[in-house]
Amino acid sequence: GAVVSQHPSWVICKSGTSVKIECRSLDFQATTMFWYRQFPKQSLMLMATSNEGSKATYEQGVEKDKFLINHASLTLSTLTVTSAHPEDSSFYICSARVSENIQYFGAGTRLSVL
Amino acid sequence: EDQVTQSPEALRLQEGESSSLNCSYTVSGLRGLFWYRQDPGKGPEFLFTLYSAGEEKEKERLKATLTKKESFLHITAPKPEDSATYLCAASGNTPLVFGKGTRLSVIA
């Protein structure tokens, strides 16, 4: 199946710093990628839809200025958590759309903000 | 509002003890019903997509079925390596909506 690589898998940072997470489609081009957030024992919550060459579409309640998304190429989308605070600690997962109805997911990034 | 509800939240089975996981959905204009497997600290792994009521798909010990309101993931003679969280998601007029998952533990 299609491979989506997400990096880093785990990051610890100090409060107030920014963290960048990368999501790459390794063997296919993805015009659309998605960013999710998952709390322990909870479902994946869609944060934003990332479209190559255009601005991301954010879900209601997600701060655009805090979670910066860039999709500069057909194989790479990045999520930058700006001025991170402890409440931003979570598991962030990206996915890439392979076809209209199928997404493949990255392995996730665990962010811990001290 | 589109919703996906999974039950039970957790399920503990003996090895070889078959069972089913339930996914109830309320989605406008269903385009697809998806099942994923998620291991701890990992992203979801795609299992199945179902598109219309009556459709069934199988993969090894797993079989997914779909009705107009529910989907079931049947696990036949499970093994310990089947232990994971199984996520159901539905795609309609809005982006993919996930349930909270069923945490399956298979005991040898």
Image: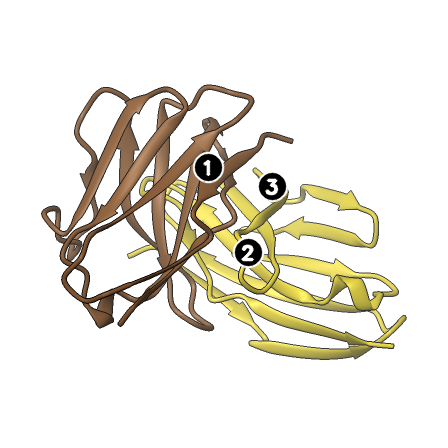
Chain colours: A brown, B yellow
In the image, residue A89 above or below residue A45: below
Q: Amino acid at mark 2?
A: Lys
Q: Nearer the viewer, mark 3 or mark 2?
A: 2
The chain carrying label 1 is: B
Q: Mark 2 or mark 3, which is nearer the start of the sequence? A: 2
Q: Secondary structure at mark 1?
A: loop
Q: Nearer the viewer, residue A114 or A107?
A: A114
Q: Which mark is residue B50?
A: 3
Give yes or no for contact between labels 3 and 1 (Cβ–Cβ under 8 Å): no
**Residue type (three-letter) at the residue carrying disc 3:** Leu
Residue B62 falls left or right of residue B46: right
Total number of numbered labels?
3
N-term-proximal mark, 2 vs 1: 1
Q: Residues within 10 Å of mark 1 (few under 14, many from 20)?
A: some
User: x, y percentage for residue B67?
Assistant: 60, 52
Q: Do the residues bearing badges 2 and 1 touch, measured as CB atoms within 8 Å?
A: no
Observer-nearest residue: B11 or B52? B11
Q: CA distance from mark 3 to mark 2?
A: 23 Å
Write down the residue under mark 1.
B31
